[in-house]
Image (spheres, rainbow, N blue to C red):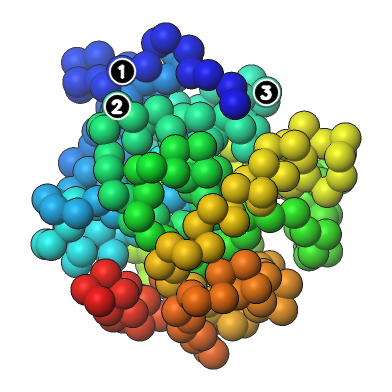
Amino acid sequence: MPSLKPMTRLLVPEQIAPELRQRADQRAGFEDEYPFESNWFEVDGRTLHYVDEGHGPVLLMVHGNPTWSFAWRKLVTDLSRDFRVIAIDHLGCGFSEKPQDRDVYTLDGHIRRLMALVSLLDLQQITLFAHDWGGAIGMGCAGRTAERFQQFVLMNTGAFRSQAIPFRISLCRIPFLGKLGDRGLNLFARAALTMAVEKPLSAAARTGLIAPYDSWAHRIAVHEFVQDIPLGPAHRSYATLTEVENSLKQFRDHRVQLIWGMKDWCFTPTDFLSEFRRRFPAAHTLEIPDAGHYVFEDAPDAVLRQSRSFLER
């Protein structure tokens, strides 16, 4: 397992670059949806942003692509009344730093940075909430620090190898054209505003979801997440995803809640929900028939009710 570099620390606002602080403070159009205080930490010389709200048992929320901690806002608002809720912005996402070196945007890199936050905050008995890429990243962190994790809530995600890549996503992997679409035209993030949901998003939700991805430079992580899907052994993240997959068996007897938008065309029920059920046969499952990939947007009340029910059992 790769080790963390020595430079890993929590930061105070005065240590944050003015540009990052200003971007975190500029929430026009979604300020009421995302009223949380900004927190920061540094790992490998990079500055990352996270939300840390409430007190009590720890809920760690890990987003995917092309979202950020904003995706968890409704859960954070409600659950932080009774729990300590922490939601990270991956490097290149949300209010975190967005370096232009594509080599930092690997599955292993995202896992190590999440591990750094867990270690810095000394989180114990964690309930992991994960969506989309958050499944592989969050379960990767859990696999390497299993003693810190207690139970899991997984939504429309994956944490194992699969060849089930939708055609519309494979188009984004075409050299030059994919980069032009993802970074130049913001097609990936903009398309998700309609393709990832079954119900129209509010103006505030639309604004908030894409606010951090407002320029070519700021869309690098969106593009690199798509490039980092490992479909074969030669891929840079294939070995890491294999490690994550192999680590799942140690959690077979842990409590697991699966929440699935059944109209998801990306992390489809057939390919992903069924595989999680096979790996976690005792898992609780909530299928939401009329919800898509952004299940937390299409069915926030149902997601919250089921999450509370799971946490209180």
Measure the alpha-carbon separation of dots 1 and 2.
7 Å
Residue lying farthest bottom? 289
Tell me, yes or no, whether the two marked residues, 1 and 2, touch with CB atoms within 8 Å. Answer: yes
Q: Secondary structure at mark 1?
A: strand
**In the drawing, does residue 164 fall left or right of residue 285?**
right
**In the drawing, does residue 310 fall left or right of residue 275?**
left
Q: Secondary structure at mark 2?
A: helix
Number of marks present in the image shown: 3
Q: Secondary structure at mark 3?
A: helix
The residue at 30%/59% (across/down) is 73
Q: Nearer the viewer, residue 36 or 179?
A: 36
**In the drawing, does residue 238 fall left or right of residue 306?**
right
**In the drawing, does residue 192 fall left or right of residue 238?**
left
Q: Position of residue 251 (x, y in %)?
A: 50, 57
Q: Nearer the viewer, residue 119 or 293?
A: 119
Sequence-wise, which precedes: disc 1 or disc 2? 1
Disc 1 or disc 2, which is closer to the eye?
2
Q: Position of residue 22 (x, y in %)?
A: 29, 29
Q: Nearer the viewer, residue 190 or 243?
A: 243
74 versus 122 height, above or below: below
Q: Amino acid at mark 1?
A: Arg
Sequence-wise, which precedes: disc 3 or disc 1? 1
Q: Which mark is residue 9?
A: 1
Sequence-wise, which precedes: disc 3 or disc 2? 3
The residue at 22%/73% (across/down) is 312
The quadrant where residue 240 appears? top right
According to the image, label 2 marks what residue?
Answer: 120
247 versus 253 height, above or below: above
Measure the alpha-carbon separation of dots 3 and 2.
24 Å
Q: Dot 3, how many residues are within 10 Å of its Cα: few (below 14), some (14-19), or many (20+)? A: few
According to the image, label 3 marks what residue?
Answer: 103
